[in-house]
Image (cartoon, helix red, strand yellow):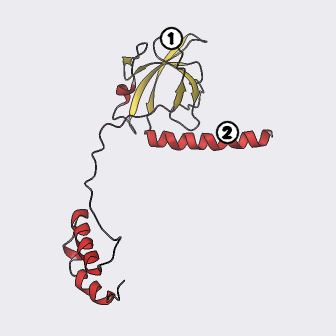
Amino acid sequence: IHGTDWDSLASEYKKFLPCINNNYDYAEMLSELLGELNASHTGARYRKPEPMGDQTASLGAFFDPDYEGEGLKITEVIANGPLIDSEQKIKAGVIIEKIDGEGIKEGMNYYPLLNRKAGKWSLLSFFDPDKNKRWTKNIKLISTGAESRLLYRRWIESNRKSKRAV
């Protein structure tokens, strides 16, 4: 770039590296270096990280939007998600009645019950109307990012199955 003497710049800026211990200072040093190059479309900047804020966990299931009643009626449990259990009791038709002891009222926004719980254990209360059975189970909830990865795998598997059927 403009016949720059890279060896000279490297030795000049190398001495600052031991004093840099954060991203802001590193970006400032890079900005100085790039300024000496006097080349367009170069730059270095620092952006303060945004706070994580509220992170709602996911249950790893699809729910019936037309279900009228208390709780969340499961229509599908996502493969390899947190609701997969060895007894296969949690399946389509089962209703999640409570999250950590708090009942899910009809029409209630249940997401606040999952707030800041990704990667943590929660006690879920289930009801199977076909067997008229209730039970509770500790479930380790997942992040929305983890659920997105499971949904991507689901999509891939769905495409594989549809190609086999052709």
User: Nearer the N terminus, badge 2 or badge 1?
Assistant: 1
User: Which image quadrant for residue 163?
Assistant: top right
Specify few, some or many for label 1: CA neighbours under 10 Å numbering under 14, 14-19, or 20 or more.
few
Image x and y of residue 4, in percent:
32, 87
Towards the viewer: 113 or 155: 155
Q: State left or right for residue 103 relative to residue 59.
A: left
Q: Main secondary structure of the magenta part?
A: loop
Residue, x 24% and y 81% (percent of image)?
13
* SS state under label 1: loop
Specify few, some or many for label 2: CA neighbours under 10 Å numbering under 14, 14-19, or 20 or more.
few
* SS state under label 2: helix
Q: CA distance from mark 2 to mark 1?
A: 29 Å
Query: Which numbered dot is residue 158?
Result: 2
User: Which residue type does callout 2 highlight?
Assistant: Ser
Residue 25 drawn in magenta = no
Vertical position of residue 143 compared to residue 136: above or below: below
Residue, x 31% and y 69% (percent of image)?
43
Q: State left or right for residue 24 relative to residue 155.
A: left
Vertical position of residue 80 compared to residue 109: above or below: below
Q: Badge 1 is on which residue? A: 68
Identify the residue at the far left of this view: 19
Vertical position of residue 115 compared to residue 4: above or below: above
User: Which image quadrant for residue 47?
Assistant: bottom left
Q: State left or right for residue 19 relative to residue 137.
A: left
The N terminus, quarter of image: bottom left
Image x and y of residue 49, in percent:
28, 52
Identify the residue at the far right of this view: 166
Residue, x 79% and y 38% (percent of image)?
165
Image x and y of residue 93, in percent:
59, 18
Bounds of the magenta span? 54-60
The C terminus, quarter of image: top right
Residue, x 35% and y 85% (percent of image)?
2
